[in-house]
Amino acid sequence: MATKPIRPAGRANAGAAKSQAANLRQTRREHAHETAEDYVEAIGDLIAETGEARVVDLAKRLGVTHATVNRTIGRLRKAGYVTSQPYRSIFLTDSGRDLAVACKSRHETVVAFLRSLGIPERVAEMDAEGIEHHVSPETLAAFRNALRND
């Protein structure tokens, strides 16, 4: 049985490759934003609960290593969401606080909506962690409207 040789991508495939690369870059940006949202929400929660957010507490809460937290905090600092110094607490900037409040509200709305459908608390919390980053403003508004009408 003869096999066809693998040919290098031609012009037609070059467009598809560029499109795929652009899509993958966009997906990586979206995942980075999801991570930023998870971190600022967790930092806000820790500050509200204990008065401070430390690397060790974030690592424990998010289930990641200290090194991962430090790298992410560096990115959040560059993005203007947090301020921090080595071996000190992490603080949210005004824009970090705004993002944390928006994320917390979105999370609570998704959980409340799922709970209104009879989803158990534990499952609703787990599902909300994924849904909250992808729900459109229109769908979120519909969730809130449905909750008001319950």
Image (cartoon, helix red, strand yellow):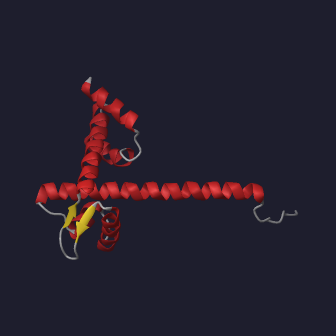
56 relative position to 11: left or right:
left
Q: Residue furthest right?
A: 2
Q: Residue at x 33, y 48 (%)?
A: 126
Q: Residue at x 39, y 33 (%)?
A: 138
Total numbered circles = 0
State the image coordinates of residue 34 (x, y, percent, origin top left): 38, 54
Q: Nearer the viewer, residue 94 or 132?
A: 94
Q: Nearer the viewer, residue 114 or 147?
A: 147
Name which quarter of the figure residue 144 lies in.
top left
41 relative position to 19: left or right:
left
Q: Nearer the viewer, residue 141 or 58?
A: 141
Tell me if residue 103 can be seen: yes
Tell me if residue 119 can be seen: no
88 relative position to 76: left or right:
left
Q: Nearer the viewer, residue 84 or 53?
A: 84
The quarter of the picture where the N terminus appears is: bottom right
Q: Residue at x 18, y 73 (%)?
A: 88
Q: Residue furthest top?
A: 149
Residue 23 lies, with reference to residue 5, above or below; the image says: above
Q: Residue at x 68, y 54 (%)?
A: 16
Name which quarter of the figure residue 15 lies in.
bottom right
The quarter of the picture where the C terminus appears is: top left
